[in-house]
């Protein structure tokens, strides 16, 4: 008759010695029956609880997902440190992780195979045990314990390698943080230089604008001086021509008059001469002239002789002619003198215009020199502005590169942090597996059997003990733990294969620096979304894990 050996608020355990079975009824009234000599199903509640016992507080699904994600994170970090000395180191880390994943696949394949074989051996051992053949059973249990010990060593090796990789990645994170600080310093320097260049550019632009205004003013002054010079040159040219013409006309007219009327010309010339003699000399000259005139008249009268009437008529006509000639000579001489004066005046005007033109020309040349100097200054300023613009453009490009590098490094730091925590969990998982293997290798099952053999009880009494609540729940739990280790090997192997394949694919990509920078934000967003989804799923699984652990605790 079945007997209830444990009842809790979460599950009820019932044993049936006749069938060598144990039945567990969960609070939702779901019942599962386990046989002492049969390897339990991987999906059974007890095996799930045993798996969680190995994992303790670890979430298998999250852990496997994170293992596969390490490849993405290492690739993300690789892209983030592209172009730095850390990139080569991360390349090595990716290879180490690839090897680790490959060894995990090998180990878990072995665990899965060995676990199933050992589990069947243990089930067979319990089969012989309940038939009273303890030595046969103990041989199989001892063999399974040795294999469990070997598996524990493998698990410890993988735990140590995970820890070592985590430590190396932590160093890489520190190096990346230093690079981030250097990038920050470089950015601060670039920003300060850009501010200084921008200020200098503003100053040069202002100077250029002022110089442009000054050049415009000089151009106006220069054009005005040039216009005035041209006018003075034109004036000097015209007055020079007029002076030459009037002076020539005066000379020609004077010569003509002198030829026609010498005395009139002499008189006109004398009238134009400056009055340099004193009064006495002037009076003496007048007397001499009068005397000469009288002698001339007397000579004329003597020459005329006896033809008094005819001579008188001729004298009258001659006197009229001479008077007319004297009058014409004086007029002509005056005209000649006027032309000569006009020539002198226009010549003076021409000279004055030439002097004014020369003065304006000198003023224009001074303005031209200033204009050329300012144009040279403007060219220098424009050249400086062009140089500043080029430097600012280059600095802007450099700043963008450093900003991109800084963002990339920050993403790499974030990736390293997640890799480190994942590898810590991986190490913890393998350490837990080692403990589970140690527990299976050093189970108290053999001790209990040895104690029964040493007790001297008859086989029937010993068999009753093996089917009682003092032994059967522990034996079935032992089988469940082997089943749990086997199933863990299967699941973790599949996760390791995915991580390995992802690592190979990412290593084969080998993007350039620019391509790597372009991949950073999308990769980070993808990983962040996966982490958030895993966190939600993990929260939902927590309650189930607690229930499974409580169930296992109630059976052993």
Image: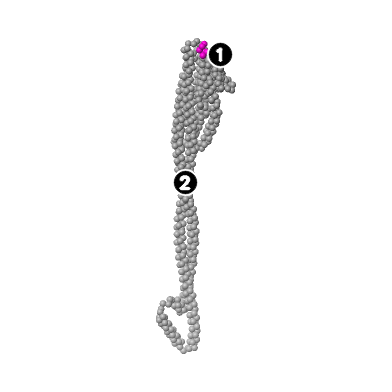
Q: CA distance from mark 1 to mark 2?
A: 91 Å
Q: Position of residue 68 (x, y in %)?
A: 51, 29
| Residue furthest right as drawn | 29
Q: Is residue 402 above or below residue 242?
A: above
Residue 18 has which mark? 1
Q: Earlier in the sequence, mark 1 or mark 2?
A: 1
User: Is residue 119 at all visible to an observer of this figure?
Assistant: no
Which secondary structure type mostly characterizes the magenta part of the structure? helix
Badge 1: residue crowd in 10 Å (few <14, some 14–19, many ≥20): few
Q: Position of residue 147 (x, y in %)?
A: 47, 20
- Mark 1 or 2, closer to the camera: 1
| Point 46% across, 60% down: residue | 364
Badge 2: residue crowd in 10 Å (few <14, some 14–19, many ≥20): few
User: Is residue 319 at all visible to an observer of this figure?
Assistant: yes
Q: Is residue 391 magenta?
A: no
Secondary structure type for disc 1? loop
Q: Is residue 327 above or below residue 146?
A: below
Identify the image quadrant of the N terminus.
Answer: top right
| Point 48% across, 64% down: residue | 232
Secondary structure type for disc 2? helix
Q: Nearer the viewer, residue 52 or 414?
A: 52
Q: Is residue 472 above or below residue 403?
A: above
Q: What's drawn in magenta, residue-wise?
A: 460-465
Q: Is residue 462 magenta?
A: yes
Q: Nearer the viewer, residue 58 or 529?
A: 58
Residue wearing tag 2: 195
Residue 3 has which mark? none
Q: Position of residue 263 (x, y in %)?
A: 45, 79
Q: Nearer the viewer, residue 416 or 30?
A: 30
């Amino acid at each position: 008759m079945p007997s209830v050996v444990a009842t809790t608020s979460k599950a009820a355990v019932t044993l049936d010695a006749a069938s060598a079975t144990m039945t567990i009824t969960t609070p939702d009234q779901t019942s599962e029956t386990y046989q002492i000599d049969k390897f339990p199903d991987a999906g059974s509640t007890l095996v799930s609880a045993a798996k969680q016992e190995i994992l303790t507080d670890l979430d298998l699904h999250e852990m496997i997902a994170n293992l596969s994600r390490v490849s993405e994170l290492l690739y993300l970090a690789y892209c983030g440190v592209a172009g730095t000395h850390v990139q080569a180191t991360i390349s090595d880390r990716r290879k180490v992780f690839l090897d680790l994943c490959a060894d995990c696949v090998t180990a878990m394949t072995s665990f899965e195979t060995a676990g199933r074989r050992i589990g069947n051996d243990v089930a067979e051992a319990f089969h012989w045990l309940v038939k009273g053949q303890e030595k046969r059973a103990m041989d199989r249990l001892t063999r399974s314990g040795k294999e469990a010990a070997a598996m524990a060593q493998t698990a410890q090796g993988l735990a140590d390698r995970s820890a070592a990789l985590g430590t190396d990645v932590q160093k890489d994170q520190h190096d990346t943080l230093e690079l981030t600080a250097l990038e920050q310093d470089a950015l601060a320097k670039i920003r300060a230089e850009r501010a200084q260049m921008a200020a200098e550019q503003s100053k040069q632009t202002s100077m250029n604008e002022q110089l442009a205004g000054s050049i415009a003013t000089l151009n106006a002054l220069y054009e005005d001086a040039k216009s005035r010079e041209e006018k003075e040159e034109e004036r000097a040219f015209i007055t020079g021509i007029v002076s030459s013409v009037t002076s020539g006309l005066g000379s020609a007219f004077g010569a003509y008059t002198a030829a026609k009327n010498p005395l009139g010309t002499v008189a006109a010339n004398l009238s134009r001469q400056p009055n340099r003699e004193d009064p006495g000399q002037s009076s003496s000259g007048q007397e001499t002239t009068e005397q000469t005139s009288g002698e001339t008249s007397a000579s004329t009268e003597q020459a005329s002789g006896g033809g008094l009437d005819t001579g008188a008529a001729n004298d009258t006509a001659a006197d009229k002619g001479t008077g007319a000639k004297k009058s014409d000579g004086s007029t002509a001489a005056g005209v000649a003198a006027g032309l000569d004066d006009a020539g002198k005046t226009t010549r003076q005007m021409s000279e004055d215009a030439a002097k004014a033109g020369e003065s304006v020309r000198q003023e224009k040349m001074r303005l031209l020199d200033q204009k050329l100097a300012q144009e040279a200054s403007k060219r220098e300023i424009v050249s400086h502005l062009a140089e500043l613009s080029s430097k600012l453009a280059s600095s802007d490009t450099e700043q963008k590169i450093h900003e991109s590098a800084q963002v990339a490094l920050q993403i790499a730091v974030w990736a390293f942090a997640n890799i480190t925590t994942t590898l810590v969990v991986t190490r913890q998982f393998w350490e837990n597996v080692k403990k589970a293997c140690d527990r299976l290798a050093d189970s108290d099952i053999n001790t209990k059997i040895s104690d029964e053999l040493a007790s001297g009880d008859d086989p029937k009494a010993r068999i009753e003990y093996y089917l009682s609540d003092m032994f059967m729940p522990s034996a079935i739990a032992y089988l469940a733990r082997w089943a749990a280790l086997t199933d863990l090997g299967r699941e973790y192997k599949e996760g390791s294969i995915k991580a390995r394949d992802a690592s190979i694919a990412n290593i084969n990509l080998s993007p350039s620096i620019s391509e790597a920078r372009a991949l950073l934000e999308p990769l980070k967003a993808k990983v962040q979304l996966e982490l958030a989804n895993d966190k939600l799923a993990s929260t939902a699984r927590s309650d189930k894990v607690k229930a499974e652990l409580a169930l296992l605790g109630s059976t052993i």
